Image (cartoon, rainbow, N blue to C red):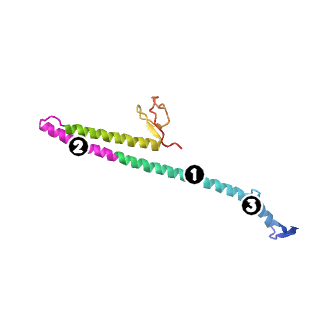
Amino acid sequence: MNNEVIMHEINPGEYSYSGDIYKYNYILMNEGGFYMDLKNNFSKITKSISESASNVVQKSNELIEVSSLNGEISNEEKKKNMIYIAIGKVVYNSFINKAELSEEIRHKCEAILEHDEQIKIIMDKIINVKRVKKCPNCGVDMNISINFCPDCGVMQKLIEDDNTL
């Protein structure tokens, strides 16, 4: 290949260039040669990496949120277990003393029901984050938008989708 570039004056102040290097660079950069293919491939790769990174971030955020909600459920379960122990002590002492069971037991049982309600609310939040629900009949996991269980066919409870785009 000849590295010589020749300048030609077309009109006053307008120049044209010729030579093997100029032709090679023009084809490489302007006529879709190897450079354009490489540029397009890098653009596609960059876009794919960007989309994948976005998906990873979204899944990571979902995992963090579900882990946090599962921690809240665990705390509610611990509170319930402490109440169960307290109920057991009260009932046992009442039994030992041959006394009628007190109002305290009823209050402890009501407190357990309150914690059960909190667990249900948190579990609903997990459903909305994961967009998955369990069939109450057979326990199969399914998307929250499914109306009938794909395993047993039981009609499913409608769940409001809080993650609409």
Decide if residue 76 is on the left or right side of residue 15: left
**55 left or right, relative to 44:** left
Based on the picture, tell me whether residue 17 belongs to the magenta stretch. Answer: no
Which residue is identified by label 1?
Answer: 51
Choose the circle earlier in sequence order: 2 or 1. 1
Tag 3 secondary structure: helix
Pointer 2 and pointer 3: residues touching (CB < 8 Å)? no
Q: Nearer the viewer, residue 53 or 99?
A: 99
Name the front one of labels 2 and 3: 2
Tell me which amino acid carries mark 3: Met
Neighbours of disc 3 within 10 Å: few (<14), some (14-19), many (20+): few
Q: What's the residue at 17%, 39% (across, down)?
A: 92
Q: Position of residue 61 (x, y in %)?
A: 47, 51
Q: 15 or 38: nearer the eye?
A: 15
User: Which region is colored magenta?
Assistant: 74-102
- The spot of residue 150 in percent (x, y) is 48, 32
Q: Quadrant of the N terminus?
A: bottom right
- Secondary structure at badge 2 equals helix
Q: Which residue is mark 3?
A: 29
Principal SS element in the magenta part? helix
- What amino acid is labelled 1 in the image? Glu
Secondary structure of the residue carrying tag 1 is helix
Q: Quadrant of the C terminus?
A: top right
| Residue 73, position as x, y percentages in the image | 35, 45
The span from disc 2 to disc 3 (Cα, nearest Å) is: 78 Å
Q: Quadrant of residue 113?
A: top left
Kindly identify which residue carries mark 2.
85
Under mark 2, the amino acid is: Ile
Q: In the figure, 121 relative to 28: above or below?
A: above
Q: Earlier in the sequence, mark 2 or mark 3?
A: 3
